[in-house]
Image: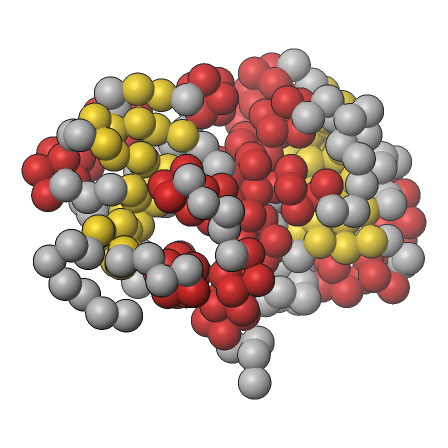
Amino acid sequence: MRINGATELYGIMGNPVVHSLSPAMHNGAFGALGLNKVYLPFGVQDVARAMTGLRALGIKGVSVTIPHKQAVMAHLDSLDPVAEKIGAVNTLVINNNAIHGANTDWLGANRALSEKINLQGASVLLLGAGGSARAIGFGLLEAGASLTIASRTQEKGQDLAKLLGCSWLPLAEADNITADILVNATSLGMAPQQELSPIAREALANFQVVMDIVYAPLATRLLQEAGQAGCQTVNGLAMLLYQGAAQFELWTGLQAPVEVMRQSLLTSLGCNP
Ligand code: NDP
């Protein structure tokens, strides 16, 4: 990568961002297409001042991650309607000082699942009621799927179910449900607690496709057991990759080099030789 006076600047804004895989993924993509662009980590505490800084410095595009996905919304010039419904922004596109907010998390999840199953008319059991579950839930409804949410904390789960117009049940009852698709959007199974799984092994035969959005480790206990139960599996890299590919396309108008981005992510996760 050669940086010069015409290099355009992109980045990720969050707190912390030190472990983010996005710089490797996006710089890999920029490099593969020979684009004079660079993507950097921005550890941000003060969102309002950061947004002023993005405009002042002429930064072209930014990924937004925890804990700023809601806070940035107060500082936008325009907002994508689906991001507005989701109530969270993970992508900023900046043109002539005007900041547009979008959400590609739901696109990433839908594309990852669509490689295995048609979402139109599919039934989905979605585990979790946090930020990711919210984006994934809205996205699945956009795609024509029907949804049930199961989560640990009743009030939070019921609030999300009400917002999405679907039913809710306690996570402990997820073992009794049958659906086409199971999505784990809790952090259960994430290192260092990789021995945990959100649902009993015996219940996995109730699903055709099981997607885990946890990506560290990639082969979670849930996915290992789902594979053994004969389910098709989708790991957390797929959503991460495809939400990034959608960001790349919003920023550049070019088709994202998905295979290059996948390899960059795998290398960052220590999965490539
Ligand atoms: P949030 O903190 O917003 O939500 C976490 C969810 O997990 C909540 O519903 C919470 O339950 C549930 N949870 C956490 N611990 C437990 C537990 N011990 N038992 C039962 N439920 C539990 O996090 P995010 O939605 O942002 O992220 C969730 C996971 O997804 C993380 O592992 C993250 O790394 C991963 N992720 C992956 C992405 C990808 O692209 N692949 C993108 C974003 C995140 P409760 O409702 O009770 O609080």
Q: Is residue 102 left or right of residue 243?
A: left
| Of residues 50 and 196, the one drawn nearer to the viewer in this rendering | 50
Vertical side of 102 occupied by 212: above or below: below
Residue 59 position by quadrant: top left
Vertical side of 14 occupied by 228: above or below: below
Q: Is residue 127 visible?
A: no
Vertical side of 189 occupied by 172: above or below: above
Rendered location of residue 119, percent (x, y): 76, 32
Quadrant containing the C terminus in the rendered view: bottom right
| Of residues 58 and 82, the one drawn nearer to the viewer in this rendering | 58
- The number of callouts visible is 0
Q: Is residue 190 left or right of residue 25?
A: right
| Of residues 18 and 81, the one drawn nearer to the viewer in this rendering | 81
Give the residue at the far bottom of this rendering.
273
Residue drawn at point x = 30 percent, y = 19 percent: 78
Residue drawn at point x = 55 percent, y = 56 percent: 258
Residue drawn at point x = 24 percent, y = 42 percent: 60
Rendered location of residue 77, percent (x, y): 24, 20
| Of residues 236 and 6, the one drawn nearer to the viewer in this rendering | 6
Residue drawn at point x = 17 percent, y = 30 percent: 96
Quadrant containing the N terminus in the rendered view: bottom left
Q: Is residue 112 left or right of residue 124?
A: left
Vertical side of 134 occupied by 60: above or below: below
Rendered location of residue 265, percent (x, y): 50, 65
Rendered location of residue 151, percent (x, y): 64, 35
